[in-house]
Image (cartoon, coloured by chain):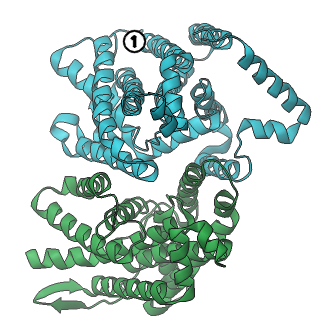
Amino acid sequence: MLLELIIRGITIGLVYALMGVGLALLNGVMRIINFAHGEFYMIGGYMAYYAMTLMKFPFYLAVPTAIAITFVIGAIVEKLLLSPIHTQDIEKPMDYALIMTFALLIFFRQLAIKIFGPFRHKPPDYIPADVHILGVKISGNEVLAGTVSLLLLLGLAFYIKRSWRGRGWRATTLSRKGANLNGVNIGKESWISCGVACALAGAAGALVAPIFTLSPTIGGSPLVKSYEVMAIGGLGSIGGALVAGLMLGVTETLGAFYISSAYKDGIGFLMMAFFLLFRPQGLFGQK
Amino acid sequence: MQRSEIIVAIIMVILGLMAPWVLPSVWTTVVSIFCYYAILTIGWNIIFGYTGLFSYGHVAFPAIGGYTSALLVEHLGLSPFMGLLAGALGAGTAGVLIGLLILRVHGFYLCLVTWAFAEVVNVILKAEHEITGGTGGFLAPSFVSGPNAELFGYFIGVGLMVFMFIVSAVLYHSRWGLYLFAVRDDIDAAESMGVKTRFWKVFGFALGCAVSGVAGAFYAHYFNLVDPSLGGLDEMGKVCLIVIIGGLGTVFGPILGSFFVVIVAEFLRGWVGGYSLLIFATIMILAVRFVRGGFMQIIQVISPHLRDKYLALIAKNQMEPRKS
């Protein structure tokens, strides 16, 4: 039982980490709080659903389709709505961005209710068979979600570490002005990183869609989890986000089973508040 | 208080007394909701607009105030009027504790810590369903029993709103208010001038929380129900919207914003039907995208002549000697 809980916690933790990394990237490069992050998760899930049911795509095409569409939506949102807030020199960019993304949250949610309908949908299973790991039976969907999340995280970490664009993002995170002086095109990098962040959320949503069913209001809980992951792991640290996601996933699963399932959501918040107050640089950050 | 504020307070009292006899009876409920949001946002305006602490968990405090008052009145047999005071004290105490905790954090982190606090409060309220009634809510007794209970509650709401408006106006023009503004505008300069910044931060935070605790207690006894949705994230968005629309850090801001968001929205409800939230969000997006300056910028876009008049009015108001 314990082993099963831990494996389940690790799977869900990897998905949390994927969401949290997107948010950390967005916060690092653009310096804004994105409250609409969970809605891209919802959109990703629906896109995968429609790709599989309407277009009859197999799952290995449906998930990339969802990722591509959320990338485009994220980039458009940044270009049209967010870029004027953080490029122009206005007094309180964070507050305006917060209100803007909060409005986007309501907007996407209401639009989803009007377009997709308020009912729950469930996409067909990606891998219908069960997998046995260490004598524990786990559904193929969860294994797929965990593996692909891990691969995406490693791929992103490698990209940010090695490519020129990744270096540009890291430089922008350290100092906007300095990066700009050294030839980083902030406007361009902003929409690309916003698209990537939203695509990561879309990927998470598409991957877990067959496990948790889809409805227009599912964006709330992953949004909260991604903030917890970002706060625990430290802003802009991918390794920290990975460990924080795993920690959160396992603690929550164990806590829900052994303490009380009603307090499941409280555990993450308490961890977040503790880290913010007593270790604001996150798990691996330096002062 | 300045003359304009006294006039507005008197107008609010007169309109509030007249409303139940002039308007259809459903409007007493709408105006009571307006009073609730006005008191709540006056509290947030003191925290964010005056003191400059971006608290994103403000809605936890009306929930605390509401539950404190409802539980005490139900179990200890307190009068609901004492319940209002108890709600203020409960929320104020929580505000002092959280205010002391958040001295350590700034900006973005402060936003997340307060949000985490609000969510923890919400989780506890839902989980301890033997005490709080869980998601279904807790039934609270009303202010007075009898046929006129609703009208009576309405007058209490208007009275509380005017009282809180006067408190925030007096604070705005007082020495204490100046300390809060100093903390908001430049904390280092304030510290070097001998302002006890740590004390005033906690004071501003706790005062705003206590004001919202009264709002929660009023809500509980007027609608006879407190439920955890009082402390939800959607409510927080509404609070932000009200203060931003009305004008951040101004005395009239919360009243003006609540008027638009509650009463004007109620007028428009019949036309837009199920699309109201979608339209609301679209307006919010467009407002932040194009007219970040608020009403001032709208005036500027529409007519340069009006803008000059408006500026002259502001200059005249500022030159008048302060009466506090």
**Residue at the spot 49% in from the left edge and 13% down from the top edge:** B163
Q: Quadrant of residue A147?
A: bottom left
Q: Quadrant of the N terminus of chain A?
A: bottom left
Residue carrying label 1: B149
Answer with the quarter of the image where residue B8 lies: top right
Residue B43 image position (x, y, % from top left) = 46, 28
Q: Residue at x 67, y 64 (%)?
A: A83
> In the rendered view, does A14 fall on the left or right side of A137?
right
Asked if residue A212 is positioned above or below residue A36 in the image, the reply reads below
Q: How many marks?
A: 1
Q: Chain for mark 1?
A: B
Reply above or below: B7 against B26: above
Disc 1 marks a residue whose amino acid type is Ala
Determine if residue B292 is in view: yes
Residue at the image position 41 percent from the left and 38 percent from the top: B58
Seen as rendered, the residue at the extreme right is B305
Q: State whether residue A123 is above or below residue B141.
A: below
- The percent coordinates of residue B252 (x first, y second) are 62, 24
At 40% from the left and 47% from the top, the residue drawn is B110
| Mark 1 element type | helix
Q: Nearer the viewer, residue B243 or A107?
A: B243
Asked whether B195 or A161 is in front, the reply is B195
**Which corner quadrant holds the C terminus of chain A?**
bottom left
Between B9 and A262, the one lying in front of the other is B9
Q: Is residue B313 above or below residue B82?
A: below
Chain rendered cyan: B
Give residue A77's position: percent from left, percent from top: 63, 66
Between B85 and A59, which is closer to the camera in this rendering?
B85
Task: Give chain A's shade.
Answer: green
